[in-house]
Amino acid sequence: MSETKRPFVVIAEFKVNPEHLDAFLALAADDATSSVAHEPGCSTFDVCVSPDDPGTVLFYEVYENRAAFDAHLETPHLARFRAGFPALIEAERPVRFLERACRGAGGA
């Protein structure tokens, strides 16, 4: 089976200790901004917080393909995030991998 041309989507979700939320979001912002700025295969990296439960943080990442995501796994900014986040969270939910089927107009 050949590799699909659909963008590769990664959804990661964390339950963050409320007293460490700011520190977690700072680490997440470093990973997100560095990913979009320095990885040509990363088009989107949004860090989302639940309005009903601010300790629930979701990453929505879009890569050109699986190979671009695999390259992300080797970056120094992800290494920084991985080194710092475990002490800040209560739980990490299983990462989900999808392919984007369509995108709404505007892309905002």
Image: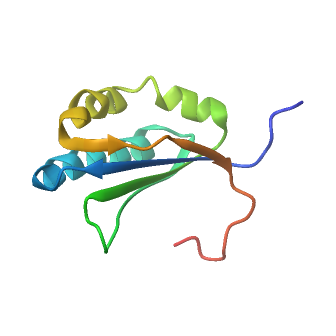
Q: In percent of the image, x 20 and y 49: which residue is there?
A: 26
Query: Relative to residue 104, is residue 81 depicted above or below?
Result: above
Render colour scheme: rainbow
Where residue 103 sits, quadrant-wise, is bottom right
Q: Is residue 39 left or right of residue 16?
A: right
**Picture quarter with the N terminus:** top right
- In the rendered image, residue 46, in percent from the top left (x then y), is placed at 42, 57
Query: Relative to residue 58, is residue 64 depicted above or below?
Result: above
Where residue 49 sits, quadrant-wise, is bottom left
Query: Relative to residue 57, is residue 3 depicted above or below?
Result: above
Q: In this view, does 45 lie to the left or right of 26?
A: right
Residue placed furthest toward the front = 90
- In the rendered image, residue 8, in percent from the top left (x then y), is placed at 65, 45
Tally the marks.
Answer: 0
- In the rendered image, residue 56, in percent from the top left (x then y), is placed at 32, 58
Q: In percent of the image, x 15 and y 54: which residue is there?
A: 22
Query: Relative to residue 107, is residue 43 depicted above or below?
Result: above
Residue placed furthest toward the bottom = 105
Q: In percent of the image, x 49 and y 40: which residue is there?
A: 94
The one nearer the camera, 62 or 85, is 85
Residue placed furthest toward the left = 19
Q: In percent of the image, x 59 and y 34: which residue is there?
A: 68
Residue placed furthest toward the top = 74
Where residue 105 sits, quadrant-wise, is bottom right
